[in-house]
Image (spheres, rainbow, N blue to C red):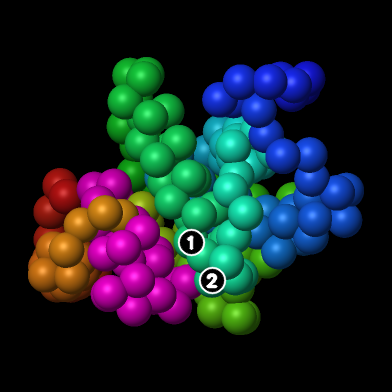
Amino acid sequence: MELPEKGPNRARRRPPEEIERWVEEYADDVYRLAFTYLKSAHDADDMVQTVFLKALSKAPDFEDSTHERAWFVRVTANACKDALRGRRRHPMAAGSSQDIADVADAQGRSAVSDGASFAPREGAAPGPVTEAVLSLSADYREAVFLYYYEGYSTREIASLTESTEVTVRARLSRARKKLRILLKGGSNEC
């Protein structure tokens, strides 16, 4: 990708070490978040490339690593929402969703940071919790992922998603309620 030399889209040339550090630090997070939105390993891989291309061309100079990580999460979420808006999505049949742990293992990635488990181990069928979380609407899935799997506070999620803390808490509460219903054998409509 050739970067423009002049104009508003001109990016600061970044040293290769910085780009390598971004990939090492954020590629797994970007992939996992993209997978929770797109539910496809191939689409998630494409989204990782898209996000890092945006980082190369548009990333600002960050104050610290917290701002840097937040930028990657926000850009990933927005790019995934754009991708979902831009194409017609066909709902997957129950049980046909790809196991996140298998996908992550095949890509040489961990399923979720800090050893937490978003899905069963290799070779196991997707568990009921995984299927239930993946069946939630995008807003609920995003809140659950960022809160429970990435460890963000409701205040941080509100900032990342450009919503209020009250909205984030409501989404988490509604998501938990839907998950309880789904896991007790209720309807699969979320």
Q: Which region of the structure is painted magenta?
A: 135-160
What residue is at 61 percent from the left and 70 percent from the top? 65
| Residue contact at pointers 1 and 2, CB within 8 angstroms | yes
**Quarter of the rendering containing residue 147:** bottom left
Residue under label 2: 66
Query: How many callouts does the rendering have?
Result: 2
Residue beneath the point at 43% across and 51% down: 74
169 w.r.t. 101: above or below: below
Mark 2: give few (<14), some (14-19) or many (20+) Cα within 10 Å. Answer: few
- Relative height, residue 45 to residue 24 (above, below): above
Question: Where is residue 48 drawn, in percent x and y?
Answer: 63, 41
Residue at image position (75%, 21%) is 5
Look at the image and say whether residue 151 sits in the magenta stretch. yes
Closer to us: 168 or 53 = 53
Please give left or right for residue 157 compared with residue 171 in the image. Answer: right
Residue 177 position, x and y percent, is 13, 70
